[in-house]
Image (cartoon, rainbow, N blue to C red):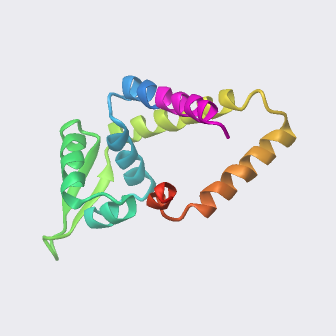
Amino acid sequence: MDQQLFHQLLDIFEFKKSYQLRSSGLNYLQLHVLERIYEGEGLKTLDISKQMGISPSTLIGVLDELEIRELIKRDRQKADKRVVLVTTADKGKQKVLQHIKEDEVFLRNLTACLNEEESVQFTGLLQKIINSTTELEDLFKG
């Protein structure tokens, strides 16, 4: 793949990120964290941090902002006060569902130029790339 084509592809996904920032009012990390909480209702903060590969302090800042916006709820466990479970509030669920719908529309429109065979082939190639990429840092090793 030549560099110009690669940068055009990145521009498409950068536009997607900026569009969803405008439509949701959340930055990429906030939206991604909210989506992760929605998918795994009742997750511990430490588990979210590990799953997403972000530091606990960064996650706490994101959770604080999501809680202020009434998108999530945090529940400190009575048995072990160090454990905090995070769930999506109704407003948060609405944001995630809007995001999922936007992703579906985006992907459908992005791949509308492909016929069914090309779409299957494209999906297979993407899956092959994703499966071969175990460590993102390795992508920059010479």
On the rendered structure, is 103 left or right of 62? right
Q: Quadrant of residue 68?
A: top left
- State the image coordinates of residue 61 (x, y, percent, origin top left): 18, 48
For the N terminus, the quadrant is top right
Q: Can you say whether 79 is above or below 128 in the image?
A: below
Residue 116 shows up from this direction:
yes
Highlighted range, magenta: 1-16
Q: Main secondary structure of the magenta part?
A: helix
User: Residue, x 23% and y 35% (percent of image)?
Assistant: 69
**Residue at image point 63% right, 31% down:** 5
> Which residue is more in the foreground, 17 or 36?
17
Is residue 120 depicted above or below 134 in this figure?
above
In the image, taking residue 120 as reference, residue 141 lies left or right, namely left
The quadrant where residue 131 appears:
bottom right
Task: Using the image, determine if residue 82 lies above or below residue 108.
Answer: below
Q: What residue occupies the far bottom of the structure in this picture? A: 79
| Residue 52 location (% of width, % of height) | 38, 58
**Residue 89, quarter of picture:** top left
Task: Name the residue at 33% across, 36% down.
Answer: 91
Front-most of 122 and 59? 122
Question: How many numbered marks, from 0 up?
Answer: 0
Kindly identify the residue that appears in the image at 78 percent across and 41 percent down: 119
Q: Is residue 15 one of those drawn in magenta?
A: yes
142 on left or right of 125? left
Q: Position of residue 107 (x, y in %)?
A: 63, 34
Q: Position of residue 102 (x, y in %)?
A: 53, 31
